[in-house]
Image (cartoon, rainbow, N blue to C red):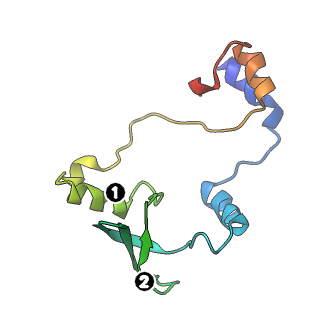
Amino acid sequence: MALTTQVLSPFTHLPPTHSADFLSHLILQYPSAFAHFHHRATSYSLHPTGVTVHFAESSRHPAQPDVEADVVLASDGVKSLLRKEMYKKAGIEGAKQEAKYSEWIAWRGLVPVETFKKAMGEESSNKLM
């Protein structure tokens, strides 16, 4: 525990940031021509040339038209509808695959490489993190 305090101590003056707030600011930096946010992907269809993603209407946004892609990266959270769809298509019972609290906590953060090496040693690998 002392190691964590030592490594993170230069950053203790920073206020905590909720991931939704962070993502909201990140979205503003992303070119709108490359990605569309605030749409709920509900399913997908595989075909020989790629995949089609289907979206639902929400109370704040109209339904996004279907999107054609080569690859889909589903970062739609712990209650992912696309993950459920993937298990369904693979013949795997979705209820058995739902995320469950494991009683583990992951602390994520960034530290300068020099601080990491000072705490972990010059020969240490950042792959451990």
**Place of residue 31 in the rendered image (x, y in percent of width and height, measured from the top left):** 68, 70
Q: Is residue 83 above or below residue 60?
A: above
Q: How many marks?
A: 2
Q: Which residue is mark 2?
A: 57
Q: Is residue 36 left or right of residue 103?
A: right
Which quarter of the figure is the N terminus placed in?
A: top right
Q: Which residue is mark 1?
A: 83
Residue sitting at 69 percent across and 61 percent down? 26
Which element is circle 1 on? helix
Looking at the rendered structure, the kind of residue marked 2 is Glu
3D distance between C-alphas at marks 1 and 2: 19 Å
Q: Quadrant of residue 4?
A: top right
Q: Is residue 62 above or below residue 14?
A: below
Q: Is residue 20 above or below residue 104?
A: below
Badge 1: few (under 14), some or many (20 or more) residues near its Cα, within 10 Å? many
Q: Is residue 11 left or right of residue 99?
A: right
Which element is circle 2 on? loop
Q: Is residue 8 left or right of residue 95?
A: right
Q: Which mark is residue 50?
A: none
Of residue 26 and residue 65, the one placed in the foreground of this image is: 65
Looking at the rendered structure, the kind of residue marked 1 is Arg
Could you tell me if the residues under marks 1 and 2 are in contact, i.e. CB atoms within 8 Å? no
Q: Is residue 31 above or below residue 101?
A: below
Badge 2: few (under 14), some or many (20 or more) residues near its Cα, within 10 Å? some
Of residue 90 and residue 57, the one placed in the foreground of this image is: 90
Q: Quadrant of residue 13?
A: top right
Of residue 95 and residue 42, the one placed in the foreground of this image is: 42
**Place of residue 51 in the rendered image (x, y in percent of width and height, measured from the top left):** 36, 67
Residue sitting at 35 percent across and 67 percent down? 49
**Place of residue 50 in the rendered image (x, y in percent of width and height, measured from the top left):** 37, 65
